[in-house]
Image: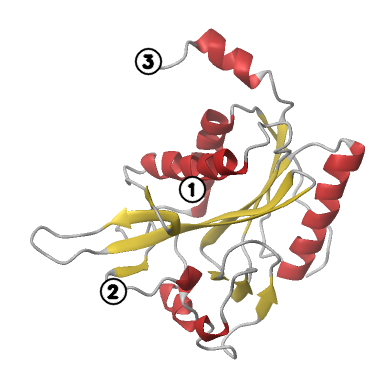
């Protein structure tokens, strides 16, 4: 049974509003990382508001703390950045919505597994807005779409990645949802170290859905409220005053 509206509103009131920012132009990865580190410190030490920051990056690869050298197939293709987050290699680029989540996990239950599960549920709920069934798999990080045809071999494609780091119980890094990236850009790495037959990468547009970034943003916004039980307040995007 779904909770009553009264209970839902009371649960939302347990948390302060979360700031929600969308960058209109691609953001340099190192600049974004430096900002996140500062904001995490300010949330813990100065009581700064929590923040969800939506953006795109120029084409690049990032290496998590478990990245294996052999999974970087084409090191010269795009810049490679040490991310400091958990996980292995991943790709970021135009057409992919990155959502960096700077949230106080200490106040949100102090349970890392539950927090990761909420990130997964957030993505799955957003995909449901487009009638896409997102699923999680044991031993495989991220959210997947089953594209197996009747009588055919198993085929599952990854549509969203999750990479996270916590510092003094405040999260940073976050999720990436493939809206309409160039999927060939993923071939320069073994995405998240997963190379088994029948597993690939997809996007909303690759699934045949005419989704634009604004549509994805609205779906993510609606789903965030539902999953994290937090009100959102729109704010100016970080680094927007920088000259590109």
SS type, badge 1:
helix
Residue wearing tag 1 = 216
Give how far across and how far down residue 69 sits, in percent. 57, 84
Q: Which of the two labelled residues, at mark 1 and mark 2, occupies the earlier sequence position?
A: 2
Q: Quadrant of the C terminus?
A: bottom right
Cα separation between marks 1 and 3: 28 Å
Cα separation between marks 1 and 2: 29 Å
Say left or right for 125 vs 227.
left
Mark 2: give few (<14), some (14-19) or many (20+) Cα within 10 Å. few
Give how far across and how far down residue 92 sits, in percent. 57, 68
60 shown above or below 236: below
Furthest-bottom residue in view? 76
SS type, badge 3:
loop
Residue wearing tag 3 = 1
Disc 1 + disc 3, Cβ < 8 Å: no
Which residue: 82% across, 49% down? 39
Mark 3: give few (<14), some (14-19) or many (20+) Cα within 10 Å. few
Which residue: 68% across, 75% down? 81
133 shown above or below 204: above
Which residue: 71% across, 66% down? 84
Q: Quadrant of the N terminus?
A: top left
Residue wearing tag 2 = 197
């Amino acid at each position: 049974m779904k909770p009553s509206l009264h209970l839902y509103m009371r649960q939302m009131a347990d948390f302060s509003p979360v700031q929600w920012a969308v960058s209109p132009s691609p953001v340099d990865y190192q600049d974004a990382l430096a900002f996140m580190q500062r904001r995490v410190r300010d949330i813990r030490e100065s009581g700064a508001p929590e923040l969800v920051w939506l953006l795109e990056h120029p084409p690049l690869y990032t290496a998590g703390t478990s990245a294996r050298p052999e999974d970087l197939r084409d090191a010269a293709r795009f810049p490679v950045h040490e991310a400091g987050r958990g996980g292995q290699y991943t790709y970021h680029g135009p057409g992919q919505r990155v959502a960096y989540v700077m949230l106080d996990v200490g106040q949100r239950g102090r349970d890392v597994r539950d927090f990761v599960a909420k990130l997964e549920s957030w993505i799955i709920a957003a995909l449901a807005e487009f009638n896409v069934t997102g699923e999680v798999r044991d031993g495989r990080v991220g959210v997947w779409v089953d594209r197996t045809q009747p009588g055919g071999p198993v085929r599952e494609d990854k549509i969203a990645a999750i990479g996270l780091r916590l510092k003094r119980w405040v999260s940073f890094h976050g999720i990436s949802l493939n809206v309409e990236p160039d999927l060939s850009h993923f071939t320069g790495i073994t995405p998240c170290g997963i190379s088994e037959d029948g597993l690939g990468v997809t996007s909303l547009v690759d699934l045949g859905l005419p989704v634009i970034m604004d549509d994805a943003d609205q779906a993510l916004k609606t789903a965030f409220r539902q999953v994290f039980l937090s009100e959102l307040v729109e704010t100016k995007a970080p680094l927007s005053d920088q000259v590109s």
